[in-house]
Amino acid sequence: METNETLKTIKQRRSIRNFKEQQIKNEDLYKILEAGSYAPYAWDQSWHFTVVQNREMLDRLNNAAKDAARQMDDDYFKKLGNDEQYDCLYGAPTLIIVSGDKQAGIQLDADCAAATQNMLLAAESLGLGSCWILWVLMAFHSSEAAQLLKDLKIPDGYRPYDTAVFGYRKGPVVTAQERKTDLITFIR
C-alpha cells in the first residue's frame, strides 16, 4: 500500500529499550522539542519540557522510581524495584519530562500525551530511537519527590505527566507487528 512519509514514520516507530551511550546531537534535540511544542492542545500550551542529559540525575531518577516501586503492594513492581540491574531508562542518554500546569484545567493529560507523541515521531523521523517511559514517573511519588521537582527546575504548579527517552539505537530495528483488525466500528 502506497503511503506518505508521515504515515511511514508512524508505522515504523517502535519503542527502543537498548541505547548507545552516545548523546544525541543538539540540532536533533531541538527539532524533537519543537515538534512537541507544535502538538495539539486544549488549554493554552500549558506544558513544560525538562531535558535531562546528566547521567547522575538520570541514575537518581531511576533509583527514586525503583524506591517507590519497592513500596507498592504489587509483586511485579517490587521485584523490578529490587533488581539492581534494572534501569527504567534503558541506558538512554536523554530523558524529556513533559509537565503540565495543574491550574490549566481540561485535558492536561491529553495535551501532555500529544506533545510526547509528537516528540516520539520526530525522533523516529530523524533516525533516533525513543521509548515512552511511564515507570520513571514513580520517582515523583518517592520520598525524594519534592527535591527532584526542585532540582529538575519543574515550574511551581506543574506536575510531570509523561516522560520519554531518546538516543541512538543499539541493535537492529524491529519491524512492527501486524495490527488487530477488529478495533474499528463504523456507524454510517
Image (cartoon, helix red, strand yellow):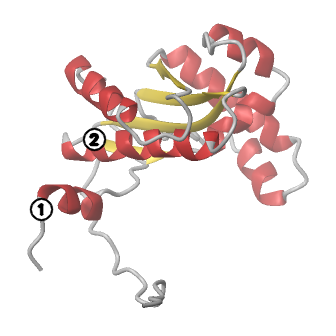
Whole-percent x, y for residue 135 in the image: 64, 44
Q: Nearer the viewer, mark 1 or mark 2?
A: 1
For image coordinates 26% across by 68% down, the residue present is 175
Q: Position of residue 100 (x, y in %)?
A: 62, 29
Using the numbered discs, state the Cα–Cα distance from disc 1 to disc 2 in whole angstroms. Answer: 15 Å
Indicate left or right for 43 with 14 as reference. Answer: right
Image mark for residue 92: none
Which quadrant holds the N terminus?
Answer: bottom left
Specify whether 26 is left or right of 141.
left
Compared to residue 41, the image places residue 181 above or below, namely: below
Whether residue 152 is situated above or below residue 170 in the rendered picture = above
Residue 180 in picture, x, y percent from top left: 43, 84
Which residue is denoted by mark 2 in the rendering? 122
Dividing the image into 4 quarters, which one contains the C terminus? Answer: bottom left
Q: Which residue is mark 1?
A: 4
Pointer 1: residues within 10 angstroms few (<14), some, or many (20+)?
Answer: few
